[in-house]
Image: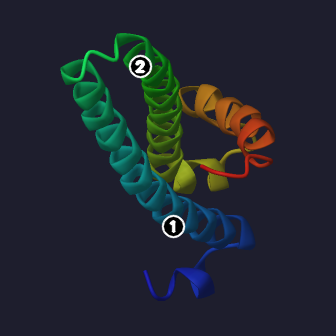
């Protein structure tokens, strides 16, 4: 791993570096998402206990949005893992392997959508 930079072309080292950075970011985001979702679940339970159903309904909508966003990040994580497994193969071929095409296209799409968000 340490000598990859010397033995592999720039594509390989840049891709591996980007994937490592992405993995760390995703782990941080995952922790934050879990904390937010747990807070919302507890808040909903408290609101329901206090017969504040309307307020709980509003919080439930927020929870669904957070859960959908978490699902998107899980897809990003899976696509990143797919690419990580095939970086060596991508370096050798002039085209992406078939099993990586969806992952690459999806990450490009996600990058355009998630790059501008203020809170992950």
Q: Nearer the viewer, residue 52 or 118?
A: 52
Q: Is residue 44 above or below residue 37?
A: above
Which part of the image, by quadrant, shows the N terminus? bottom left
Instruction: Choose the circle earlier in sequence order: 1 or 2.
Output: 1
Please name the colour scheme applied to the rendered image.
Answer: rainbow
Q: Position of residue 48 (x, y in %)?
A: 25, 19
Q: Residue at x 29, y 32 (%)?
A: 41
Q: Nearer the viewer, residue 114 or 75?
A: 114
Image coordinates of residue 68 in percent, x first then y, are 49, 24
Above/below status of 107 relative to 102: below
Q: Residues within 10 Å of mark 2 (few under 14, many from 20)?
A: some
Q: Is residue 41 above or below residue 50?
A: below
Q: Is residue 101 left or right of residue 48?
A: right
Q: Secondary structure at mark 2?
A: helix
Residue appearing at x 80%, y 47% in the figure: 116
Which residue is pictured at 34% across the width and 45% down the height? 34
Q: Which residue is mark 1?
A: 20
Which quadrant of the view contains residue 112? top right
Residue position marked by numbered label 2 in the rendering:
60
Q: Residue 95, percent across and down?
A: 73, 37
């Amino acid at each position: 791993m340490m000598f990859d930079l010397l033995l592999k072309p720039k594509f390989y080292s840049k891709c591996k570096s980007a994937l490592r950075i992405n993995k760390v970011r995703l782990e941080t985001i995952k922790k934050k998402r879990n904390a937010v979702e747990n807070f919302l679940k507890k808040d909903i339970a408290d609101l329901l206990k206090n017969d504040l159903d309307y307020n709980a309904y509003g919080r439930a909508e927020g929870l669904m949005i957070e859960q959908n966003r978490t699902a998107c990040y899980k897809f990003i994580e899976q696509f990143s893992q797919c690419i990580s497994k095939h970086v060596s193969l991508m370096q050798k071929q002039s085209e992406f392997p078939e099993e990586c095409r969806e992952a690459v296209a999806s990450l490009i799409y996600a990058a355009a959508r998630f790059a501008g968000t203020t809170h992950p």
